[in-house]
Image (tube, rainbow, N blue to C red):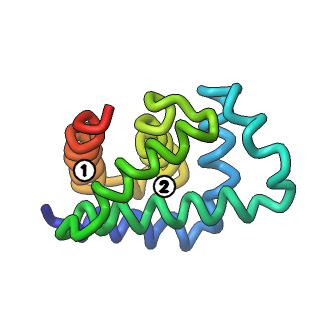
């Protein structure tokens, strides 16, 4: 898979500022029961670390999948033990994509959109093996 559009989208989003609050606001809007799991994360550092780890796994998965899919599948189990339903975990990357598309507006090009759609479809298949 050509990772260049994914990387470009991440760089463009980063140039606009830290997207953590926006990603989690969207997550909590669609899955309000998840907000309670972050009650002690008053600084947002846990959310920031989680998004960074998710994006690192995503980039590895998109490139050569040395560990990305295994990490995602392991984190499904870890998060389930914390009270995160598997379907919410699986929907997280879609939440990231939607947020980034909104942040970028017109800069979210057709090649970026196609790359994210392809990548999310591949992740869905990989995660379905665990679910």
Q: Nearer the viewer, residue 74 or 8?
A: 74
Residue at the image position 52 percent from the left and 47 percent from the top: 78
> Mark 2: few, some, or many residues within 10 Å (few <14, many ≥20)?
some
Left or right placement of residue 124 versus residue 45 in this view = left
Q: Is residue 35 left or right of residue 43?
A: left
Disc 1 versus disc 2: distance between alpha carbons? 18 Å
Work out whether 31 lies above or below 115. above
Residue that appears at 41% across and 58% down: 107
Residue beneath label 1, please? Answer: 119
The residue that label 2 is drawn on is 104
Label 1 crowding class (10 Å Cα cut-off): few <14, some 14-19, many 20+? Answer: many
User: Could you tell whether 7 is left or right of 1 in the image?
Assistant: right
Disc 2, SS:
helix
Q: Nearer the viewer, residue 37 or 25?
A: 37
Sequence-earlier tag: 1 or 2: 2
- Judge whether 28 appears above or below 15 on screen: above
For residue 99, which numbered disc appears in the image? none
Q: Residue at x 23, y 37 (%)?
A: 129
Residue 119 in sight from this viewpoint: yes
């Amino acid at each position: 898979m050509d990772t260049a559009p994914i990387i470009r989208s991440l760089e463009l989003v980063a140039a606009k500022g830290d997207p953590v609050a926006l990603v989690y606001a969207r997550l909590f809007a669609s899955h309000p029961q998840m907000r309670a799991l972050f009650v002690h994360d008053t600084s947002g550092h846990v959310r920031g670390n989680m998004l960074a780890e998710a994006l690192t796994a995503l980039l590895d998965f998109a490139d050569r999948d040395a560990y990305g899919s295994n990490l995602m599948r392991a984190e499904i189990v870890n998060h389930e033990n914390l009270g995160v339903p598997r379907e919410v975990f699986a929907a997280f990357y879609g939440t990231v994509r939607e947020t980034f598309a909104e942040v970028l507006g017109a800069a979210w090009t057709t090649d970026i959109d196609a790359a994210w759609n392809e990548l999310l479809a591949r992740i869905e298949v990989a995660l379905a093996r665990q679910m």
